[in-house]
Image (cartoon, rainbow, N blue to C red):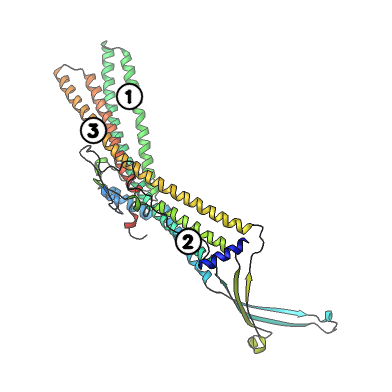
């Protein structure tokens, strides 16, 4: 009864069974954040960023940071990264599987040839004669063609095409993430190096402070507990050095892995934060365009398309199918007379196969295909929501980074001014040397926090470019 209803629906529709795919509509949103997106950041450290709504992301967005080292390493990674090579190979594989799928629309033609030596005894037929032996040669061919009357094969090829699209978007996604990870790791390396330099400056000051405290304790002008306290602080600061060096090493090793090289045979360029410019104008793709450009959303959409097509494949499996066939050839005991008129044979026919009872297997396979489509649709919606969240986070992060950097810059400037005044007081004899050292240490501590905020601002800019899709659509075909 269920199969009969499906047959009626097919003839009424006059097309392949199963639902036709329609691209999901973009979310009804004009911005990523509640109350609208920021249009710019405040000016911090002499620089601000303007968010240009609707502007396009360039394919080589990393060049906007103005670093030749970044440009060179990204180019190296694109050419050598193993994951990118694997994604390219997977794309070729999926496209060849699609081409293989098109073969179902053509007749299947096969040829056969063989020879056999036989010996027969006529005793079983009541004839007491010597056995006879002969060689039999056969050459023939066959043609079969399955009529795709329900469109099951068309739906299968549609699913293969959608999976090929998914692999294409996955390649673009791997490209975008690779570029983002390379730039982020290089910026992290530069930031850690700046923090290490400042930390070593603090250690130098603390060691000088320790020397003064030891001299005072020896002269009886200060308690020995001051020496112990400062010595503890020196050791604590010295413990930070290997931690920062480890982070620098990890950043370098990550970069070498991303460019497809071993750490022992390839050196990462040594960058400083001063070598990097902050992009002033940052594009912000409209939400309606983001869902048509961001690779992970397009992968989810193509996966949904493939799952939708599989409903048609499962539906067609429940319906009768017709196969046309023909075969022919010749056989003879002599190769020279293989195609003699009396040696030729052939047949033409048609067959119908209709599922009658499969214990509910075919029906539930179709239900499972529908469930798979529904799951893919839910994952698509979640992917879109996650993408919007990442863009919203990046926009707010840049806004807050500028605010934090402005405060850190004030702290650095104030600490630097306090150090200058105290040094003047020390020269005038109204301040102790220990006070000078302490003030200088406060300045360097503020400088470390400032450097970390500068690095974070640059890295959050990278995150925004990646969240917006990385501009892969403007790149040369891969």
- Say few, some or many: other residues with alpha carbon within 10 Å of mark 3 (under 14 / 14 to 19 / 20 or more): many
The residue positioned farthest toward the bottom in the image shown: 341
Q: Which residue is mark 2?
A: 20
- Say few, some or many: other residues with alpha carbon within 10 Å of mark 1 (under 14 / 14 to 19 / 20 or more): some
Q: Is residue 110 left or right of residue 35?
A: right
Camera-nearest residue between 453 and 326 = 326
Mark 1 or mark 3: whose residue is earlier in sequence: 1
Mark 1 or mark 2: whose residue is earlier in sequence: 2
Q: Is residue 257 left or right of residue 150?
A: left
Q: Which residue is mark 1?
A: 234
Camera-nearest residue between 77 and 390 = 390
Is 109 drawn above or below residue 282 in the view shown? below
Spatial CA distance of label 1 from label 3 is 26 Å
Classify residue 460 by image quadrant.
top left
Residue 118 location, x and y as percent? 73, 79
Q: Residue at x 55, y 74 (%)?
A: 107
Q: Which residue is mark 3?
A: 409
Residue 41 location, x and y as percent? 25, 40
Residue 184 location, x and y as percent? 34, 44
Q: Is residue 452 left or right of residue 322?
A: left
Spatial CA distance of label 1 from label 2 is 71 Å
Mark whose residue sits in front, 1 or 3: 3
Disc 3 is placed on an element classified as helix
Disc 1 is placed on an element classified as helix
Q: Residue at x 33, y 21 (%)?
A: 231
Q: Residue at x 66, y 60 (%)?
A: 358
Camera-nearest residue between 17 and 469 = 17
Mark whose residue sits in front, 3 or 2: 2
Is 443 drawn above or below residue 189 in the view shown? above
In this rendering, does residue 369 appear at all? yes
Q: Quadrant of the C terminus?
A: bottom left
Is 125 drawn above or below residue 459 in the view shown? below
């Amino acid at each position: 009864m269920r199969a009969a209803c499906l047959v009626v629906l097919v003839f009424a529709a006059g097309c392949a069974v199963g639902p036709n795919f329609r691209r999901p509509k973009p979310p009804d949103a004009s911005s990523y954040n509640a109350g609208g997106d920021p249009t710019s950041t405040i000016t911090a450290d002499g620089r601000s960023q303007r968010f240009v709504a609707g502007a396009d992301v360039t394919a080589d967005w990393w060049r906007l940071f103005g670093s030749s080292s970044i440009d060179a390493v990204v180019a190296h990674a694109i050419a050598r990264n193993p994951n990118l090579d694997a994604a390219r190979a997977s794309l070729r594989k999926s496209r060849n599987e699609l081409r293989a799928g098109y073969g179902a629309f053509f007749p299947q033609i096969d040829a056969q040839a063989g020879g056999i030596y036989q010996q027969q005894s006529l005793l079983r037929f009541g004839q007491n004669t010597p056995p006879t032996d002969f060689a039999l040669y056969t050459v023939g061919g066959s043609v079969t063609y399955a009529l795709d009357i329900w469109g099951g094969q068309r739906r299968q090829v549609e699913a293969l095409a959608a999976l090929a699209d998914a692999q294409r978007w996955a390649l673009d996604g791997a490209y975008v993430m690779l570029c983002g990870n390379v730039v982020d790791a290089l910026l992290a390396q530069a930031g850690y190096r700046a923090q290490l330099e400042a930390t070593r400056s603090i250690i130098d000051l603390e060691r000088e402070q320790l020397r003064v405290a030891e001299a005072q304790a020896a002269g009886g002008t200060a308690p020995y507990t001051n020496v112990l306290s400062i010595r503890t602080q020196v050791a604590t600061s010295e413990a930070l050095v290997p931690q920062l060096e480890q982070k620098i090493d990890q950043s370098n090793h990550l970069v070498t892995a991303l460019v497809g090289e071993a750490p022992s045979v390839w050196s990462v360029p040594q960058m400083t934060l001063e070598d990097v410019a902050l992009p002033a104008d940052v594009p912000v793709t409209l939400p309606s365009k983001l869902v048509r450009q961001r690779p992970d959303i397009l992968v989810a959409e193509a996966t949904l398309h493939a799952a939708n097509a599989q409903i048609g494949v499962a539906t067609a499996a429940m319906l009768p199918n017709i196969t046309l066939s023909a075969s022919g050839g010749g056989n003879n005991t002599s190769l020279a007379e293989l195609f003699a008129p009396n040696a030729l044979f052939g047949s033409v026919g048609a067959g119908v196969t209709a599922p009658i009872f499969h214990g509910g297997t075919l029906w539930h396979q179709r239900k499972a295909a529908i469930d798979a489509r529904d799951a893919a649709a839910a994952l698509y919606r979640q992917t879109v929501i996650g993408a919007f969240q990442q863009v919203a986070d990046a926009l707010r992060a840049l806004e807050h980074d500028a605010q934090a950097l402005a405060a850190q810059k004030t702290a650095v400037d104030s600490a630097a001014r306090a150090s200058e005044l105290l040094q003047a007081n020390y020269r005038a004899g109204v301040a102790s040397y220990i006070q000078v050292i302490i003030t200088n240490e406060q300045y360097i501590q503020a400088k470390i926090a400032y450097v970390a905020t500068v690095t974070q601002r640059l890295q959050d800019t990278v995150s925004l470019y990646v969240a917006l899709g990385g501009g892969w659509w403007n790149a040369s075909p891969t």
